[in-house]
Image (cartoon, coloured by chain):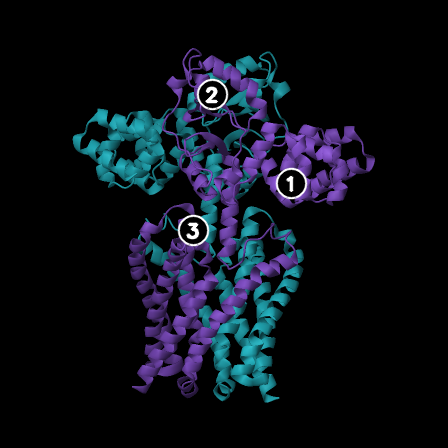
Chain colours: A purple, B cyan
Amino acid sequence: MAHLHQKLELALVSLDKSSLRATLDDYHLADIGKALAEFDPKEALPLISMFSLADRAKVFSYFPPYLQAEVAGLMKRHKLAALFSRMDADERADLYNDLDEEQQAMVLPGLAQAEREDLRQLASYAEGTVGAIMTSDYATLKEHWLVSRALKQLRLEAPDKETIYQTYVINAQRRLLGTISLRELILASPDKQVSELMRTEVVAMAVEDSQEHASQQIRHYDLLALPVVDEQHKLVGIVTYDDAMDAAVEEATEDAQKSASVGKLDQTVDRVSIWELYRKRVLWLVLLVFGAMFSGAGIAHFEDIIASHVALVFFLPLLIGSGGNAGSQAAALMVRALATGEVDKSDWAKLFSRELLVGLALGMTMAIAVYGVGIYRGGPEVALIVSMSMVVIVLVGSLVGLSLPFLLNKMKLDPATASGPLVATIADVSGVLVYFSLASVLLHW
Amino acid sequence: MAHLHQKLELALVSLDKSSLRATLDDYHLADIGKALAEFDPKEALPLISMFSLADRAKVFSYFPPYLQAEVAGLMKRHKLAALFSRMDADERADLYNDLDEEQQAMVLPGLAQAEREDLRQLASYAEGTVGAIMTSDYATLKEHWLVSRALKQLRLEAPDKETIYQTYVINAQRRLLGTISLRELILASPDKQVSELMRTEVVAMAVEDSQEHASQQIRHYDLLALPVVDEQHKLVGIVTYDDAMDAAVEEATEDAQKSASVGKLDQTVDRVSIWELYRKRVLWLVLLVFGAMFSGAGIAHFEDIIASHVALVFFLPLLIGSGGNAGSQAAALMVRALATGEVDKSDWAKLFSRELLVGLALGMTMAIAVYGVGIYRGGPEVALIVSMSMVVIVLVGSLVGLSLPFLLNKMKLDPATASGPLVATIADVSGVLVYFSLASVLLHW
């Protein structure tokens, strides 16, 4: 790809269309888009201007969103409008949302009435919903058509549709009646009717459904595209597998970051600004420090016993760390299983009772593991206190870690907020209380 | 879906083929597969036997792997062989690997010579490689064919191919020359030659490449399928988008679990046995306990200063927790960015210098946040020690968390092993040392 970058630089210096043409033929537009993203937007613009309108629209769709908006901001009004009318409906709507109001007003007049309505509609859906990734460039058939007519129609429409491999049968009111794949059409006899071939048990979603659920459905049914319908079961769009796949990967990234108490980043971690990185990390760190003060307060409460048995402090990191680790494990398992749809909220009770057994078994194993060290460093009494504390702390940590994602889910919050650090901080507090309470009772006794 | 379960139970009790047929028509086979997975395998078998062979092969592919193997183990030899010959090549190879040797020997004779070779080949690739998810059911064209001939051929082959939407042009030696989509074929004039239409800048992978990389490529180029070639650039298989999507989601799940120090589970978290869940969690927990003993040893080393200044213990959970949290954040960001290909090992130095700034800014913010509490609970000297320690601990934690995934990557280990708990345990040790060393120096001074 370094090679591609050089070729583009060369084309930029010479402003020679034919050498650019040769480069475009040798590389995939996805790679050209990626290479152009390395240029300064102001530098990239003359290059992009040399592209044909069709290539420009395509290469644009491979830019990261922030770059699309930046380059669009530098473009002349009529050029931007031309580009807009050529982009895929879903990409266009995403870009529209990234423009400022003045730019938005600039591009609208360049579009036909129907496109404008479509754009406004697509751009109106909230982030994370099916509406925000669906496209209106889908292919439809009528139920009374013959297969031959359907194939002819698809051939006509192919250049403008995101996919013609999955088609949708609608009636005059645009109600979705069924689906047919191009494979089925090609295999069928040309004089069969569409209505005879279509599958009527259709999986469809609503615009406000979550993207997470859409990609689960696409995976579950191995679909190329998922139809989106309104309350009257009228077809309003489709979500294609590639957008669903991108959504699934982005969701997994967001969840991975949340699992470590990092807020959602605007851009990839290598491009995001230092300020943004700081901002998205500091909030939880500070909140968790104040959470940790409860542990501190617990310790302060037991200052006397600590002063008289300093050896107890040796075991503190090990005990509270273990509770936090077991809790993080349980939380991570639940957050991911909820995200992939492997479990749902109704499974909590069953999973809780399993965790009771697993947590107990883990705690007892850990208790045995530290008993010897307890004897060696503090004698039999301390060993007993440490081991008993370990069982309780690991069990409590596990149960908290397991339950917190479900609780957040119930409160309509993202289960992924149950991060390892949050669970560990909660487990720490309970660990301090359990450990020193047990120590007070058993040592004074 | 509860409804579907009842219908299947009814069909099972009555053993009535026509009521089963009606149920099959009303539901997607993916849902029927899921519903059957709720039955005991022994119970499910008579139901499955009532399916047509084609439906049986399809519904089988929707079972989770452990269930496929169990049901296969209960089937009669000739029935299993028939099922095998009907399954998709890639699914068949996966199932074959899950059978015991006796069963494997049972199914081979039922297959044609070519199928047997194909099965042995597909089943031979290691888990996690492209070979393990590729299929040999792809559609090929010859370069000298006319479009009309190509379409006729595809129509003939369609029922046996995993996809006909993306086709591969090969020469007599099976070398991959280019690709054409069905959309392009349909749009082209019937008397054009395949060689005129095909794209020759083909993205292809090798059987030993990672599935992670394959799904990155499929996402990057928005492909329906990715060709797999050998050293002579001969076509040996394709990876379809749906298998790549499943692989990407499974990788993300595995990474999410590893990020919390949980080993790879055989099955989903709601189905896995309690023993397996215990086993995959206990290993890291015990290892980390012994890691935490270094923190304990550090504390023991400073027992005198702790005994004379018990108030210092108040700040211990808060300081070591903060280092661990900042480190977990950095590690989670890097693990995910390495997994999605957003960054690679060459980016370490750049990211490290950024982290130096971010870590310092985070540490100073946290130092300010705890300074007041330090004054209140321990006076100005303790406040100074706690604040200074905080800056160092958060910075060290951040840099360790950022670097560990790269180090593991360099050692050819999975970066995701740099879990939150592991990073936190390392940060704890350094936190104890920094805090009490600073305290010893400043308080004795």
Provide the secondary structure element on which disc 2 rests.
strand
Mark 2 or 3, closer to the camera: 2
**Residue found 60% across the figure and 72% down from its top:** B391
Disc 3 marks a residue whose amino acid type is Arg
**Cα separation between marks 2 and 3:** 39 Å
Location of residue B199 in the rendering, given as x and y in whole percent from the top left corner: 62, 26
Q: Does label 2 or label 3 sit earlier along the sequence?
A: 2
Disc 3 target residue: A336
Disc 1 marks a residue whose amino acid type is Phe
Q: Does label 3 or label 1 sit earlier along the sequence?
A: 1
What chain does badge 1 belong to? A
Mark 3 or 1, closer to the camera: 1
Provide the secondary structure element on which disc 3 rests.
helix
**Cα separation between marks 2 and 1:** 33 Å
**Residue found 53% across the figure and 45% down from its top:** A127
Instruction: Please report contact status of discs 2 and 1: CB closer than 8 Å, yes or no.
Output: no
The reply to whether label 2 and label 1 mark residues of one chain is yes
Disc 2 marks a residue whose amino acid type is Leu
Hey, which residue is sitting farthest left in the picture?
Answer: B14
| Looking at the image, residue B234 lies above or below residue B437 | above
Query: For residue A141, which numbered disc appears in the image?
Result: 2
Q: Is residue B369 visible?
A: yes
The reply to whether label 2 and label 3 mark residues of one chain is yes
Query: B331 or B387, which is in the foreground?
Result: B387
Disc 1 target residue: A63
